[in-house]
Each structure stands twice: as structure tokens, then as C-alpha cells.
Image (spheres, helix red, strand yellow):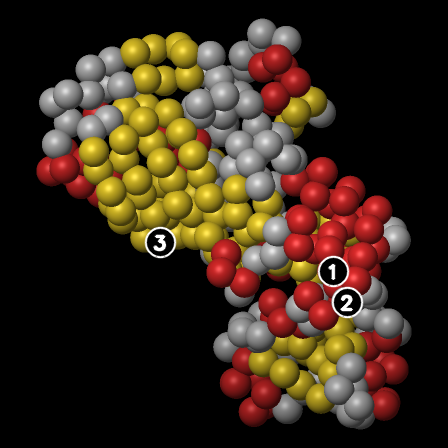
């Protein structure tokens, strides 16, 4: 069974727990999620089944939207409410004008230092393992893209924001860095991912509803086609000769019109019967298309 589930992850569950649940209920061996959510976080968690697991990297590249509740005046070692308090400050002087001014510096391309409590690896070990052992190491800053950042509510010391960002963005780090910019400290109190690519919180199914669908034998109706996440790429339909070349991993030539229409380094190829055959990547040197992924 190939496809993608839009699961609404509840607080207190890890992303791996949701994957394990889907494996257990469906009997599918190949299951993976796209974009880890911290245990305290809720919201959209795309879960890929079967051949769709090979598309996780493209889902990871899509933009995400988060709704975050930030508490000013207190900082923790994990940058969220589950950590140990490391600093307390006075947020009484923070106004909406000061917030807007501070937030403006976080829009666009920014740099972030990953939290110690994260899955980023240092010398082969996840940072959170070192953090739990009381070890803190120097982390390299990373580029993050913030496409939009809006205040949705403000009642001192609680700030609610909505963030649309690119992959690898840490909302916990954003909360902590905002507190540093304001001089009073801040931590992430609650987080919901409301969108991941084409998947929206309004259409997401809870684990309970999914389990009910599995008992009723209709869970397959909740699957999105695996090519639905590739909808922004151009579609090409190939005959049997080129289809076989793609299956063999050979470069193929497409018409100049197709090349102009694509406007991207990638396109998706289908056979005449409508089956997704593969993902093709344009090779600028040879002016041909290379099979990046081929599906059965």
C-alpha cells in the first residue's frame, strides 16, 4: 500500500510512536514520517507508507506553518517548557511595538544555533543524549528561512505567533532568540504545526480516528496518493521505449517545450496507463533527464 497519511499528532507522543502505531495497525513494513515533531508539539505529521517512504526528502523540503505560544520572562535549557529554568527576567516593559521591532529581525534568511536538546548529531551522537548527560558542546549555526512571521495574540507575558518557514527551522530556537533580543528571556510554551506542504491541520486525522478506521477496514481511504506532494512539478507521459530506459536508469531526452514548461530541475514521469514511473532530474551538462527515483 503506497500513500501518505495526514496524522494530527497529540501532545505527549513522539513522532516515532505514531509511526509504530501505523505499522502495527496496518501491517505495512515500510513506514516513515516527514519532519519530526517534539513530544510536546501537536499537529500535522505526514506519515508515508510503502514506496511513498522514498519521497520523504521532498516532503521535508516543503514549507511548514506553525502556531507557537511563547512565554516571555523565563528561559530554559531546552528552550521550551519541558526544560530546566536557566534564567528569569522582567517582561513588564515589553510592548507590542517592541515585539514587532524585535520580530522584524527574524524575518527572511536568518541563522540559528540548534538547541542542545535536538536530534542534530555531534561526532555521531544526537545532541539530546549529550544534553541528558549534562554535556554541552559548541554547535554550528545554520541557515533558516522565515517566509512569514505574524503576531496572533499578545497578553503580557504570553505571545502567540504564526510562522511559515523552510526546513530545518527550530521554533524553540526562535523563541529563545526572541527572548535574548528583548533582554528578558523567553521559552516555547506550546507548539502546533498547522501545515506541512499540502497537508493541513483541518484535514488531519487523530490517532483514535485512524485506529477506528483500521478496525472498520476503511483506513486506505485516508491515504493521499504519493504523487500528490509532487503536484507543483511538471508532468510528462512517456512511451514504452523511454519508460524502459527510465527503469534502467538511463538518461532520456525530452522535447524543448517540456523543458521550458518545467521551470525546475525536476519533473514527474508517468506511463500511458497513468502510473507514476519516476522522478526525473535535469542534467544541465548533457541537457538530458536523469531518473532520480524509479517506482514499481
Frontmost residue, 213 versus 259: 213
**Circles 1 and 2 in contact, beta carbons < 8 Å:** yes
| Cα distance between the residues tagged 1 and 2 | 5 Å
**Circles 3 and 1 in contact, beta carbons < 8 Å:** no
> Residue at coordinates 34% horizontally, 32% vertically from top-left?
70
| Cα distance between the residues tagged 3 and 1 | 36 Å
Q: Secondary structure at mark 3?
A: strand
Q: Is residue 265 left or right of residue 27?
A: left
Residue 135: x percent and y percent?
A: 58, 9
Q: Is residue 233 above or below residue 210?
A: below
Dot 2 crowding, Cα within 10 Å, few <14, some 14–19, many 20+: few
Q: Quadrant of residue 291?
A: bottom right
Frontmost residue, 152 versus 213: 213
Residue hosting label 1: 213
Q: Is residue 162 above or below residue 75?
A: below
Dot 1 crowding, Cα within 10 Å, few <14, some 14–19, many 20+: some
| Cα distance between the residues tagged 3 and 2 | 38 Å
Residue hosting label 3: 147
Q: Which mark is residue 218?
A: 2
Q: Is residue 98 left or right of residue 10?
A: left
Frontmost residue, 27 versus 238: 27
Amino acid at each position: 500500500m503506497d500513500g501518505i497519511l495526514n496524522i494530527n499528532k497529540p501532545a505527549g507522543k513522539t513522532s516515532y510512536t505514531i509511526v509504530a502505531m501505523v505499522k502495527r495497525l496496518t501491517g505495512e513494513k515500510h513506514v516513515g514520517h516527514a519532519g519530526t515533531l517534539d513530544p510536546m508539539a501537536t499537529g500535522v505529521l505526514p506519515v508515508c507508507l510503502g514506496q511513498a517512504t522514498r519521497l520523504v526528502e521532498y516532503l521535508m523540503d516543503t514549507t511548514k506553518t506553525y502556531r507557537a505560544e511563547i512565554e516571555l520572562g523565563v528561559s530554559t535549557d531546552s528552550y521550551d517548557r519541558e526544560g530546566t529554568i536557566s534564567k528569569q527576567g522582567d517582561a513588564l516593559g515589553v510592548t507590542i511595538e517592541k515585539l514587532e521591532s524585535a520580530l522584524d529581525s527574524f524575518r527572511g534568511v536568518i541563522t540559528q544555533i540548534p538547541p542542545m536538546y535536538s536530534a542534530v548529531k555531534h561526532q555521531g551522537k544526537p545532541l539530546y543524549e549529550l544534553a541528558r548527560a549534562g554535556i554541552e558542546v559548541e554547535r554550528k549555526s545554520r541557515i533558516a528561512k522565515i517566509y512569514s512571521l505574524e503576531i496572533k495574540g499578545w497578553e503580557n507575558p504570553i505571545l502567540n505567533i504564526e510562522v511559515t518557514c523552510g526546513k530545518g527551522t527550530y521554533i524553540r530556537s526562535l523563541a529563545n532568540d526572541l527572548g535574548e533580543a528583548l533582554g528578558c528571556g523567553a521559552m516555547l510554551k506550546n507548539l502546533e504545526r498547522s501545515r506541512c506542504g499540502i497537508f493541513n491541520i483541518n484535514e488531519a486525522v487523530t490517532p483514535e480516528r485512524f485506529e477506528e478506521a483500521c478496525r472498520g477496514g476503511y483506513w486506505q481511504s485516508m491515504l493521499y496518493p504519493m504523487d500528490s506532494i509532487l503536484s507543483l512539478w511538471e508532468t510528462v507521459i512517456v512511451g514504452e521505449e523511454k519508460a524502459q530506459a527510465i527503469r534502467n536508469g538511463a538518461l532520456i531526452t525530452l522535447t524543448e517545450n517540456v523543458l521550458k514548461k518545467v521551470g525546475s530541475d525536476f519533473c514527474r514521469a508517468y506511463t500511458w496507463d497513468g502510473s507514476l514511473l519516476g522522478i526525473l532530474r535535469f542534467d544541465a551538462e548533457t541537457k538530458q533527464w536523469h531518473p532520480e527515483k524509479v517506482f514499481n
